[in-house]
Image (cartoon, rainbow, N blue to C red):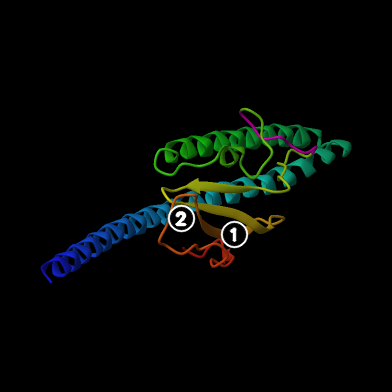
Amino acid sequence: MKIYLGGLIALLLSLGLLLILLTQHHLVQMKARGELVLCLKEVKGELHKFVTHTEKLNWAIKHIDKAKYLIFIPGLQAVAANSERAKKLVMGYQDFTLAQYLMKLTKLQKRCPQTPLAFMTPYQIGLKKFHRRFDGTTYWRKEWKTQIKGKFETAYIQIKEKKIKQLEPQFQYQYSIKRGSVFSLLPSLSGSLPSLSAHTSI
């Protein structure tokens, strides 16, 4: 009887210890997910500011570029020349904002590790500046998404829809969080986060 009781107590203690360990692991995972969601929100915020500002400058470049055709109208050659200088200034400023955005991503990298694709941006870029069309505006990539690595899970951000041929560009994003290869007690959020407006907070 004593042996049976001792074995039962040992089993209960083992189960209690296991429950404590599982609870601690669950709390660690909950904290990690909270940090990952904060990173997701911050990275998406910086991304949205960047693409919105870039497209507003594209709008300006496109309309300034139209002024170059004034060179064929007598008396307006000077206006056309000034517009070309203005266009180059805006393009230079746009390249500067690209450098600023990449610096912000570098600072975020310590808290919110991202894959190299994030630094390629949704635009086609070179080492220090945008690749441009004949009118000076930037090129979009056909497909692009960024990934943020958490302790147990990975978050994804993708621009699904965009309306950029206007002064106030609009973007629609899709988010998801997927489990990594590490054992997790938390359910995956993959596919459960709907497409949200760029102005909707997460």
Residue at x 66% of width, y 42% of height: 123
Residue at x 54% of width, y 47% of height: 147
Image x and y of residue 137, in percent: 72, 41
Residue tagged 1: 173
Image x and y of residue 27, in percent: 30, 59
Q: In the image, is residue 151 part of the stretch drawn in magenta?
A: no
What segment carries the magenta color?
128-134
Ranked by sequence position, the earlier of labels 2 and 1 is: 2
Please name whichever residue, 160 or 149, is drawn nearer the observer in this view of the structure.
149
Q: Residues within 10 Å of mark 2 (few under 14, many from 20)?
A: some
Q: Amino acid at mark 1?
A: Tyr
Residue 171 image-quadrant placement: bottom right
Residue at x 84% of width, y 40% of height: 69
Residue at x 57% of width, y 42% of height: 118
Q: Which mark is residue 41?
A: 2
Q: Is residue 111 left or right of residue 103?
A: left
Q: Amino acid at mark 2?
A: Lys
